[in-house]
Image: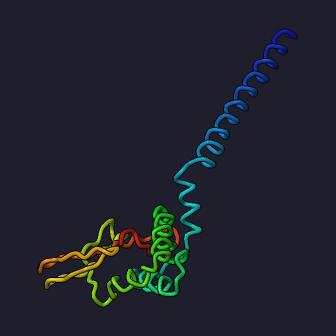
Amino acid sequence: MKKLGKISFYLVFGLSALITGYLLGFWTNFYYLSYKFNPVRISNNQALKDIQGGKTPEETYSLFVSALAQGNTELASKYFVVGKQDEKLEEFNKLKEKDELQRYIDNLPKWGELREINVFEDGRVKEFGRDVFKEERVINIQGTEYKLPAGERTQSISFRLNPTTNIWKIERL
């Protein structure tokens, strides 16, 4: 009988150790590896902090143009989706250094000239555009003049809704 009690004790102790080890392994895998280092969760954390933008694409565009007009390139870059903010900040700072920022602003379309072209992803991505160059034009890009023949072309701007904060961001300009 004493031997049966010892065997039971070791069996219960062994099963408890196995269950505890399994639970610790599960916690380590789920929490530490999946939760802490999951890039999707990191993106969600970034998305929660990304609050610059408007409740509509028009409001976001207006805030963006206003920030650029004030020379605040850092704020202007924050109106773009998270993955493009650093790239746009660098682009706007280079334009500012070359004194070409005002020309860039002048070439941006006015909101009234834009019309909704496409809606994607159940309304979370909207593309607006304007028809340009209906007559022959000469444009100057970084000191080089280009002659554009008459013809209808569309300049477009894409906006993406950040569903986490319900804020519209510029995706492509």
**Extreme right residue here?**
2
Residue name at image x 66 percent, y 34 percent:
25
Left or right? Give the position of 1 relative to 27. Answer: right
Q: Percent x, y for residue 127? A: 30, 74
Q: Toward which corner of the image does residue 107 lie, by quadrant? A: bottom left
| Quarter location, residue 104 | bottom left
> In the orientation shown, which residue stands out farthest toward the bottom?
112
| Whether residue 68 is situated above or below residue 2 in the rendered picture | below
Q: Which is nearer the eye, 9 or 19?
A: 19
Q: Residue at x 57, y 55 (%)?
A: 42
The C terminus sits in image quarter: bottom left
Residue sitting at x 57%, y 67%: 48
Whether residue 172 is situated above or below residue 152 in the rendered picture? above
Q: Does residue 83 sit above or below 156 in this rendering?
A: above
Q: Which is nearer the eye, 22 or 9?
A: 22
Percent across and percent down for residue 46 are: 57, 62
x, y (%) of residue 14?
A: 75, 21
Q: Quadrant of residue 47?
A: bottom right
The image quadrant where one finds the N terminus is: top right
Task: Report the residue at 58% width, 44% height from top.
Answer: 34
Q: Is residue 165 visible?
A: yes
Colour approach in the figure: rainbow
Q: Is residue 142 left or right of residue 85?
A: left
Residue 166 visible to the viewer: no
